[in-house]
Amino acid sequence: MLEAFVAGHHAGRNLYIWGGDDSEAAEAIRRLPYAALDVTALAPDPTECPRPDAEARALLVRRLEEALNNMASSSQPFAAILIRGAPLLARYGVGLRPFYPFVGDRRLILIAIPRPPFPNELNNPPRGLTFDPGRVSAMLEDIAGKDHVVEVTER
């Protein structure tokens, strides 16, 4: 589906999760005019939210929606928005809902989620740590749908 969008346009909500490095995600959409949004720049300062969970999540969602709205209403049209720093979304429990109003037939959002190191790159993992690459993919497929998860399997 991502290839179909890059080749032309694909009808529907084009929200994709990229399981791999954000530079590889940028390469996948390089033919499209795109902008990048680093979620870490939107993170609430701990002094802004005395109770970090609910208040910080609400503040992050509000900032994310404002940033996406500014990008969508920009005088320079973007066919794609690459989201960097996505692990912060998981930290604050922000789902995919804030992205839906900004995707469609003519704009896609690609959320880059860095993959954990491959097992042979783990040096002395903590006791009891197991790595199941399929588990991460299955979780993302449950959230976004199988056709909306793009995985990088080779390095």
Image: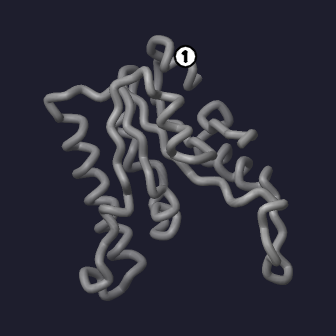
Say if 83 sits above or below 120 in the image: above
* Secondary element type, mark 1: helix
Instruction: Determine the residue positioned at 82% across, 77% down.
Output: 124
Query: Disc count in the image?
Result: 1
Rendered image quadrant of residue 38: bottom left
Where is residue 14 drawn, in percent x and y?
47, 30
Quadrant for the C terminus in the image: top right
Where is residue 23 drawn, in percent x and y?
51, 42
Circle 1 is placed at which residue position? 4
The residue lying toward the viewer, choosing from 107 and 84, is: 84
Instruction: Determine the residue positioned at 29% across, 68% down.
Output: 59
Instruction: Determine the residue positioned at 27% across, 59% down.
Output: 62
Name the side, left or right, on which 13 lies relative to 38: right
Quadrant for the N terminus in the image: top right
Where is residue 52 drawn, in percent x and y?
38, 81
Where is residue 150 drawn, in percent x and y?
63, 36
Say if 83 sits above or below 58 in the image: above
The residue lying toward the viewer, choosing from 117 and 7, is: 117
Instruction: Determine the residue positioned at 39% across, 23% down.
Output: 32
Rendered image quadrant of residue 118: bottom right
The kind of residue tagged 1 is: Ala
